[in-house]
């Protein structure tokens, strides 16, 4: 079984790397971090013009029809450059929700504008601190209107609409809500990574349009599984960048007359970082295969990719700071850009602990089914 990307997708990856190297050096996320701008609008427009926002959208709906693997390739490069754009919220989650669960009318209304970047979407799940189990949601829709509060919605302050998860009972569990419509208020929330803005969204009798095919809590879980894989690629990209940064510094920083990379302690540190990145990348590739084929193994593959990427992102960005020593902790160094993004992404779809519990549950269910079949 070959999990590698096709030559076409490798060319897309190289093109994305060249484009982002030119258009998104560390000075770009740093500018967003140090200003009141929620994201880089010029970069977002350029990304949309490149067709990346419509990568997974079929040509019939205004996209470029490259599929979900293309999104994974792009996500890794966006993570490598810590791009301050609402790509994850709009593409991994909102676009995927409409593609999977939207009616034909909803697809024709939303997908062309998502493909061009004219619309920015997001996904609103959490209602309180704690696990992101959709079965514990209390929000409901009555008479076509939604009243609830969703916490720390990624890019909620800049998004045009949200896919809102509710406790739908026997009806739809996902609804579309216009964030510029009546009954919606936004409150910006401060997080560890201001280059990816978040907001508390309050809905008071706000009109909500159901994604009718999203029935049952498993529809919400399935959306999270599909989003977890490109998110893992984004995390791998950030970890790879931190590894390269630490490796480069270890070669140019001298102590006691020789590069610090020649010392055993630094060698071991960089080796451990490399192992973490490669393990996470391997698991992300497995997840990409499961997403692309919509395999029955997707819940397991997505969980493994998510867990591995979260652990690699934290470890490698932390060790990059340590490799830089006292300089690594300072504001003027770029190490903290990757550490901030790694910590933020590790909570974006639920913590690694939640995904570990999900993996255990999936493996237990599979083993039970195998025993019963035997």
Image: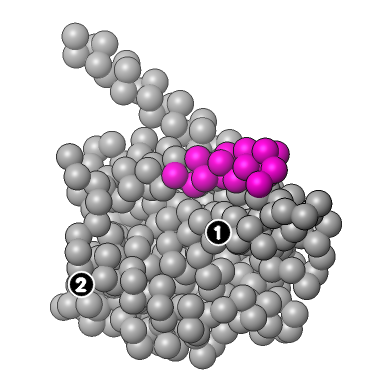
Sequence-wise, which precedes: disc 1 or disc 2?
Answer: 2
Residue name at image x 57 percent, y 79 percent: 25
The main secondary structure of the magenta stretch is helix
Q: Which corner quadrant holds the N terminus?
A: top left
Residue furthest front in the image: 257
Residue name at image x 26 percent, y 11 percent: 371
Q: Horizontal and vertical percent for residue 280?
A: 45, 44
How many neighbours does mark 2 have within 10 angstroms: few (below 14), some (14-19), or many (20 or more)? some
Q: Horizontal and vertical percent for residue 163?
A: 45, 65
Is-magenta flag for residue 156?
no
Asked whether the viewer can see residue 98, the reply is no
Is 50 drawn above or below residue 311 in the view shown?
below
Camera-side residue: 324 or 371? 324
Q: Which color scheme is applied?
A: one colour
How many neighbours does mark 1 have within 10 angstroms: few (below 14), some (14-19), or many (20 or more)? some
Q: Horizontal and vertical percent for residue 145?
A: 49, 68
Camera-side residue: 7 or 112? 7
Q: Which residues are magenta?
A: 262-278
Q: CA distance from mark 1 to mark 2?
A: 32 Å
Question: Which secondary structure lies at badge 1?
Answer: helix
**Mark 1 highlights which residue?**
244
Say the numbered circle drawn on residue 190. none
**Mark 2 highlights which residue?**
65
Q: Which corner quadrant holds the C terminus?
A: top left
Camera-side residue: 351 or 182? 351
């Amino acid at each position: 079984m070959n999990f590698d990307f096709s030559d076409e997708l490798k060319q897309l990856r190289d093109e994305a790397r060249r484009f982002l190297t030119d258009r998104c050096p560390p000075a770009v996320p740093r500018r967003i971090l140090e200003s009141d701008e929620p994201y880089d609008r010029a970069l977002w427009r350029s990304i949309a013009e490149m067709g990346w926002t419509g990568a997974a959208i079929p040509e019939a709906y205004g996209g470029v029809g490259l599929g979900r693997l293309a999104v994974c390739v792009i996500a890794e490069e966006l993570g490598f450059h810590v791009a301050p754009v609402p790509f994850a919220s709009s593409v991994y989650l909102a676009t995927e929700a409409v593609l999977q669960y939207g009616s034909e009318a909803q697809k024709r209304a939303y997908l062309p504008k998502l493909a061009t970047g004219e619309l920015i979407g997001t996904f609103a799940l959490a209602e309180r601190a704690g696990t992101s189990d959709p079965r514990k949601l209390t929000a409901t829709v009555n008479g076509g209107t939604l009243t609830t509060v969703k916490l720390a919605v990624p890019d909620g302050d800049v998004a045009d609409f949200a896919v809102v998860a509710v406790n739908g009972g026997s009806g739809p569990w996902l609804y579309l809500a216009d964030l510029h419509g009546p009954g919606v208020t936004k409150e910006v929330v401060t997080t560890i990574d201001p280059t990816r803005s978040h907001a508390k969204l309050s809905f008071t009798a706000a009109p909500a349009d159901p994604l009718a095919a999203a029935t049952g809590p498993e529809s919400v879980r399935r959306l999270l599984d599909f989003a977890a894989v490109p998110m893992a690629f984004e995390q791998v990209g950030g970890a790879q960048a931190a590894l390269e940064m630490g490796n480069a510094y270890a070669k140019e920083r001298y102590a006691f007359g020789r590069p610090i990379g020649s010392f055993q302690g630094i060698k071991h540190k960089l080796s451990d970082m490399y192992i973490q990145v490669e393990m996470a990348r391997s698991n992300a590739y497995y997840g990409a295969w499961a997403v692309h084929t919509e395999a029955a193994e997707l819940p397991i593959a997505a969980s493994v990719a998510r867990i591995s990427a979260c652990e690699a992102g934290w470890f490698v960005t932390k060790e990059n700071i340590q490799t830089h020593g006292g300089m690594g902790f300072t504001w003027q160094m770029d190490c903290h850009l990757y550490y901030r993004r790694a910590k933020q992404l590790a909570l974006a779809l639920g913590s690694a602990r939640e995904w570990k519990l999900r993996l255990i549950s999936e493996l237990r269910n599979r083993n039970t089914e195998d025993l019963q079949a035997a």
